[in-house]
Image (tube, rainbow, N blue to C red):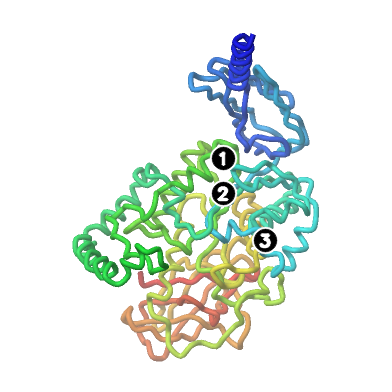
Amino acid sequence: MRLWRNILSAALVSMGAMSAQAAVTLPPVIDSHMVLQHGQSVPVWGTAVSGEEVTVKFRDQMKSTKAGADGKWSVKLDALKVGGPDVMTIAGSNTITLDDVLVGEVWVGSGQSNMQGTVSGYAKSDPVLDKLAKETYPKLRLMRGVRSKWALATPENNGGASAILFAFGVRLQQKLDMPVGIMVGAVGGTPSGYWLTADHLANDAAAQQSIKKFAESYPLDMLREKHKADLAAWEKQYGADAKAGKKVPSAPPEPQPAGECRGKIGNLYEAHIRPYQPFAIRGVLWDQGESGTAITGLDQYYAMSALIKGWRKDWGQGEFPFLYVQKQSGGGCAFDPQDPVTDKADAFTPLPKAVPATGEGLYRELHQRIAEHPRTAMVGSTDLGPGIHPTNKSGYGTRAAQVALGFVYEQDVAISGPTYKSHVVEGEKVRIHFNHVRGGLLFKHGDKLQGFAVSGDGKSFHWADAVIDGETVIVSCQDVKSPTAVRYAWGSRHTWANLFNKDGLPANAFRTDK
């Protein structure tokens, strides 16, 4: 009898395992309370037993397919109209019912700590965010990581959402008056090299050319010899303590060849972004840059070229909009220091005695250039508050939503302060033309426009007098009779630069002497 009971038990376990294997399953991103992207085809996918027929029903659509040899299946719903809530059913050997499904706009937020930081972590220092978090938003849904589930935007759930993405989503939902879903995949302290794959990098011609050019003058052999000496010195000083388990400084890192990554390239992309694909989205909001790229010889401009193209290719939805937050954060004054969006900005200051050196403005310039990539826009942040972790996340999210409304949804709102367009030398003066002037140019604070510097030889710069003339600025300096180059707001911080457009957005730093 015992033998027969064991045989029967084993058979039942086997049947249960077969049943579990045959069951249709869905990825976490496809679940009740989700928001589906309107106006484009919507993938629905999962797993089942090989050859099993799976049918997806939503509204008046029914799509069927069979699981492949690997057990994977997928269908695409035809473009959907805004609305809901509705019910989706996915049926095979079992039936899954998803309730409360909305159709509207879907955005992905990614990057490092300024995207990862939660509402609960920032609300105490951000009164606007704190107030937003205490409300319920029936048409806003939260996906707080690839291993989580879609959640309603309620006071109980809002605290765990990305602070900047939550503020972005609330403002977007209010302005568009349609459902919005926000999904986040971010890890603090991470370089962009961890968020793109080796294939993304290898297939980007511009990035590869940049690495090749860097390698031509990169003294790798010399650096390796130096590393040997540095490591020997470290071993002599700390080796015994390290073996004893005592806390000691890290050993000198080995220099990497050009194009190789410190750490594992793409590991965070695979863990936090790939599982979202190919869920239909409108676009991406990116907040990263403080940690660089971690790829030897590759700067942030070229890394983002490979990353943006790679993400778009993998998602298979064409050139979806890619918004990114400007780095460095803060560093400039605000048009209106009383506005809750900009009330954490640095105060306006007089011009420093010396014009900042070239190196002080290079990273800000580099980060601004990312907007040159197709369908990419920068969320200006110089007037939103400084620091590695700016506390004004509601302001950052609101500004990002403003950029989305103008850049993506083509509403009549400003998406940028004045940006350099061209210049003309007129004798001893230089006339500068701008994009994003909109209602006009003006200066704020102080008794005159300031922040411009000119040079006659492209090396020595002097503070210039500047006046607004229509939609242009004319600069001159009595010490420079034949000006050849102009800079504006050039410096790691430029609280002394005060040019704005009439929408209240600060002019971007620039130089003509590249």
Residue 185 is marked as: 2
Q: Which numbered disc, 1 or 3, marks the residue that appears first in the sequence? A: 1
Residue at 76% in and 48% down: 177
Q: Nearer the viewer, residue 483 or 460?
A: 460
Residue 397 place in picture, x, y as percent: 65, 60
Residue 366 is marked as: none
Q: Is residue 285 above or below residue 91?
A: below
Residue 223 horizontal side relative to residue 11, left or right: left
Are the residues at dot 2 and dot 1 in contact (C-beta closer than 8 Å)? yes
For the residues carrying marks 2 and 3, which lies nearer the camera in this image? 2
The secondary element bearing badge 2 is classed as: strand
Residue 77 place in picture, x, y as percent: 63, 28
The secondary element bearing badge 3 is classed as: helix
Toward which corner of the image does residue 279 lie, by quadrant?
A: top right
Can residue 440 be seen here? no
Locate the N terminus and report the quarter of the image it occupies.
top right
> Label 1 amino acid?
Tyr
> Label 2 amino acid?
Gly
Find disc 1 in the rendering and name its residue: 276
Q: Which numbered disc, 2 or 1, marks the residue that appears first in the sequence? A: 2
Toward which corner of the image does residue 178 lie, by quadrant?
A: top right
Locate the C terminus and report the quarter of the image it occupies.
bottom left
Q: Residues within 10 Å of mark 3 (few under 14, many from 20)?
A: many
Q: Is residue 436 above or below residue 178?
A: below
Q: Nearer the viewer, residue 229 or 312?
A: 229
Q: Nearer the viewer, residue 293 or 486?
A: 293
**Separation (CA) of disc 2 from disc 1:** 9 Å
> Label 3 amino acid?
Thr
Residue 285 horizontal side relative to residue 341, left or right: left
Q: Residues within 10 Å of mark 1 (few under 14, many from 20)?
A: many
Find disc 3 in the rendering and name its residue: 398
Q: Residues within 10 Å of mark 2 (few under 14, many from 20)?
A: many
